Amino acid sequence: MDAVTSDYSYTLGAGSAGAVIANRLSEDDNVTVLLLEAGGSELDHNYIKVPLATPLLQETDIDWSYYTIPQKASCKAMKEQRSYWPRGRVLGGTSSINHMVYIRGSRHDYDQWEKEGVVGWGYTDVLPYFLKIEDMKIVQLSNSTYHSTGGYLPITESKVTTLSNFYQRAAEELGYKAVDQNGEDMIGFSYVQSNIFGGERFSTSTAYIRPIINRLNLHISTNSFVTKILITNKTARGIEMIKNGQKRTLLARKEVILSAGAVNSPQLLMLSGIGPREHLVEHKIEVHADLPVGENMEDHPMFFMKYNTKEDLSVSVKSTQSWWNMLQYYLTRGGIFSFSGMEAMIFDKSRVKDTHTLYPDYQLMFFSIALDKASLENGLPLNYNNSVVKLAQTRAFSNEFTITQILLHPNSTGSIKLKSKDPFVHPVIDPNYLSNHHDIDIFIEAIRKTQELAKSKALRELDATLNRVDFPGICDEEEFDSDTYWECLIRHYAVTVYHPSCTCRMGDKDDPTAVVDSKLRVKGIANLRVADASVMRHVTSGNTNSPSIMIGEKAADLIRGKDTVITFRKQIKHLKP
């Protein structure tokens, strides 16, 4: 097919950041935006809008269904020691298949970015964009200086089961204060804030695309698989893509904005000749820019501890089959189907030797869904060996809840590399989990804190009892509750929390580890920017969907050359530094 030239700005990827950018750029009547998405419409999948149905979305046609390469120091209970990585392939991207937790991260995350040379991305720089995002529906927070109303994304509190009250009481006994996890200080206990409204998921497609889909200057092309960014004389000129089985070439007079996520963005850059020179030459790809694309990858691994209780207070497969619960959701959009299962969390700093950070080192997430026999078989696909699943099913009950331990700032980093120059071949994903023992030390501290919670008066009222996951051949020779026992279990069971980042990281112009500058421009290539979780300098403290949306908001201003957050900047001018 002949090349088509247009005045479009191309946004590649309609996910957490890309959908936002397409919305904001198309606010200007003199700009035409083409939003390209490899997947289809979220409206074709009824389960997407039901928060509790999140596990049913993985390993489907709206999921890229990535797998890591075999891990050396982790994933020992998994098939081939490979971790399963879901990524959204649909309008809304991963925001259409994730657990909808809304966490900005610590103020100190962003100040650290700025200290490392990412000018304009300190906390006071990004907070106005977080405010711009929000339509805060939690009454006690709607007038907070740290929040706002009127944005595209509604934020509500996920508090459905009676277990949530026990979680808070247990945290209070340990001295944790109740905090706004997105407020002044995130260290402490909080109920989960979610992008759920009216009992339904609010992805970036729902929030940012559907309200403005009839704009005449916004064009959306789904099922459009971009295979290459066309670069001539160090300038991005357009893209090649496959749609309806045909190869198409689109040339642009304006910018190409890559928002394909922390896996696909580095893959597409490398396929286009932007990446480590030696690696590109190995795959016989013409080199346009020698940059550390795909390197410095960070992700949040998590471990989990299940506790049995004397009563069935959690959501189980049986309760999801209740006609009353189904009818309640159908008529009122309330009840158990209106949340993802996550109700509360604690953020804390580590006391491990040589750890002196201002931001939290670990997160404890309270998960009010029983991982019972049926759930282990048909729930989240974690790629555990079939033999491990069968063993776990012998100790799976409907009267249990889970506390997950999440490592927020791992010392172990990984990479994304090409397996082939064929764009349809998945890249080589190596998170290199737990290669640095410091990560194990933080995990064990989080486990010890969880044990303290289990001993609290509040959880003892539930007769909360640890449901052990050591089995014959799996850590059964280690002394129970020793550090080596927990290390063994961590190296067997720890999985991704689905927060890969930093594979096209930001930095100043002289930073050899950076792919883009502080304005998200790819170094050495004109008219090309990257805007998604891949540009994070370091992974943020907590779930990464909200920061990715913020990156989209700020990217749009950088591209437009506008400052749309003056009002919000005035709102925060009296906040403590």
Image (cartoon, grey):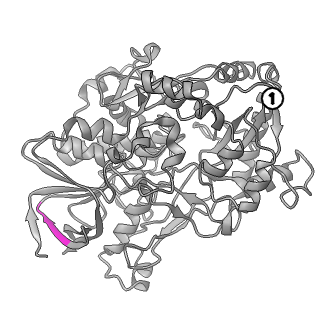
Quick check: 182 above or below 436?
above
Q: Seen in the image, is 400 located left or right of residue 154?
A: right
The rendered magenta stretch, by its main secondary structure, is classed as strand
Percent x, y for residue 489? Answer: 78, 53
Q: Position of residue 470 (x, y in %)?
A: 84, 51
Left or right: residue 360 versus residue 502 is right
Q: Residue at x 42, y 49 (%)?
A: 94
* Residue at x 41% of width, y 23% of height: 146
Q: Label 1: how many residues lie within 10 Å, few (<14), some (14-19) or many (20+)?
A: many
Percent position of residue 447, x then y:
76, 40
Tag 1's secondary structure? loop
Residue drawn at the location 54% of the way across and 40% of the way down:
542
User: On screen, 361 above or below 134?
Assistant: below
User: 428 and 42: which one is in front?
Assistant: 42
- Dividing the picture into quadrants, the one containing residue 319 is top right
Q: Which residues are magenta?
A: 248-253
Residue 354 visible in this rendered orientation of the protein: no
Q: Quadrant of residue 154?
A: top left
What type is the residue that disc 1 sits on?
Answer: Ala
Residue 324 placed where, x, y %?
Answer: 55, 24
Q: Is residue 61 visible?
A: yes
Front residue of 24 and 212: 212
Q: What's the residue at 46%, 70% (across, down)?
A: 426
**Where is mark 1, residue-wise?**
464
In the displayed structure, 474 sits above or below 115; it is below
